[in-house]
Image (cartoon, rainbow, N blue to C red):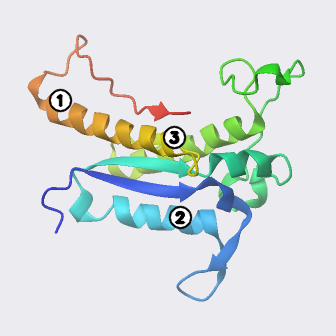
């Protein structure tokens, strides 16, 4: 069934961090925690042992708005989220992730790192991450283009020796919009 599959794309809704659902045992559980548990099950399944994983963090636009109202610490997995916010923030360039990241940008980066660390601890490999605003077709297309690029890297990687001169980083990357 998975013979020609080279990558798993796993999608998580960022805006689920304060929502709850019934788990398999009938207990009310945070949806982000449920996503994490499902992610753990998938990445450790032997079928996907040699495949690259791309984590799509979806609904960034909704998440960014929600972050202004509802603390990320509503999810117990994110209880240690304590961002440092500059006192000299300007809203003139709210998309500037380098100089004045929004609370939503800081939080989405934090979540990406949580998933990357989890993935690395379970597999010993690097996780690729893409931040997506699901209702923006160009944004989704860019994430899928990134997935195709990762697949190309995987195909080309065996042709090069891993050395200090390699063009392939051993670090996982994040592709943000």
Does 107 appear above or below 161? below
Q: Earlier in the sequence, mark 3 or mark 2?
A: 2
Q: Residues within 10 Å of mark 3 (few under 14, many from 20)?
A: some
> Does residue 31 appear in the picture of this structure?
yes
Q: Secondary structure at mark 2?
A: helix
Residue where numbered disc 2 is placed? 35
Instruction: Tell me where residue 96 sits by quadrant.
Output: top right
Marker disc for residue 47: none
> Does residue 128 appear in the picture of this structure?
no
Q: Residues within 10 Å of mark 2 (few under 14, many from 20)?
A: some
Residue 122 or residue 42, whichever sits in front:
42
Relative to 50, is 102 on the left or the right? Answer: right
Q: Residues within 10 Å of mark 1 (few under 14, many from 20)?
A: some
Does 173 appear above or below 66? above
**Distance between the alpha carbons at the discs numbered 3 and 2:** 22 Å
Residue where numbered disc 3 is placed? 139
Outermost residue to the top: 165
Q: Position of residue 24 (x, y in %)?
A: 52, 85
Residue 4 or residue 78, whichever sits in front:
4
Q: Position of residue 88 (x, y in %)?
A: 88, 18
**Distance between the alpha carbons at the discs numbered 2 and 1:** 30 Å
**Distance between the alpha carbons at the discs numbered 1 and 3:** 27 Å
Relative to 96, is 128 on the left or the right? Answer: left
Residue where numbered disc 1 is placed? 157
Q: Earlier in the sequence, mark 2 or mark 1?
A: 2
* Residue at point 58%, 51% (across, down): 135
* Residue at point 45%, 49% (across, down): 55
Relative to 18, is 113 on the left or the right? Answer: left
Relative to 127, is 100 on the left or the right? Answer: right
- Camera-side mark, 3 or 2: 3
């Amino acid at each position: 069934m998975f013979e020609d599959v080279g990558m798993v794309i796993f999608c998580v809704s960022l805006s689920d961090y304060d929502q709850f659902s019934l788990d398999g045992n009938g207990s009310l559980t945070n949806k982000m925690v449920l996503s994490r548990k499902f992610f753990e099950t998938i990445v450790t399944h032997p079928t996907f042992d040699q495949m690259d994983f791309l984590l799509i963090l979806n609904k960034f636009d909704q998440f960014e708005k929600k972050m202004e109202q509802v603390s990320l610490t509503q999810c117990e997995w994110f209880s240690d989220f304590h961002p440092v916010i500059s006192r000299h923030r300007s809203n003139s360039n709210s998309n500037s992730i380098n100089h004045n990241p929004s609370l939503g940008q800081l939080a989405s980066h934090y979540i990406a790192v949580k998933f990357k660390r989890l993935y690395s601890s379970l597999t010993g490999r690097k996780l690729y991450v893409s931040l997506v605003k699901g209702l923006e077709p160009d944004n989704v297309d860019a994430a899928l283009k990134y997935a195709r690029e990762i697949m190309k890297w995987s195909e080309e990687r065996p042709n090069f020796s891993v050395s200090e001169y390699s063009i392939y980083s051993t670090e996982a990357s994040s592709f943000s919009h």
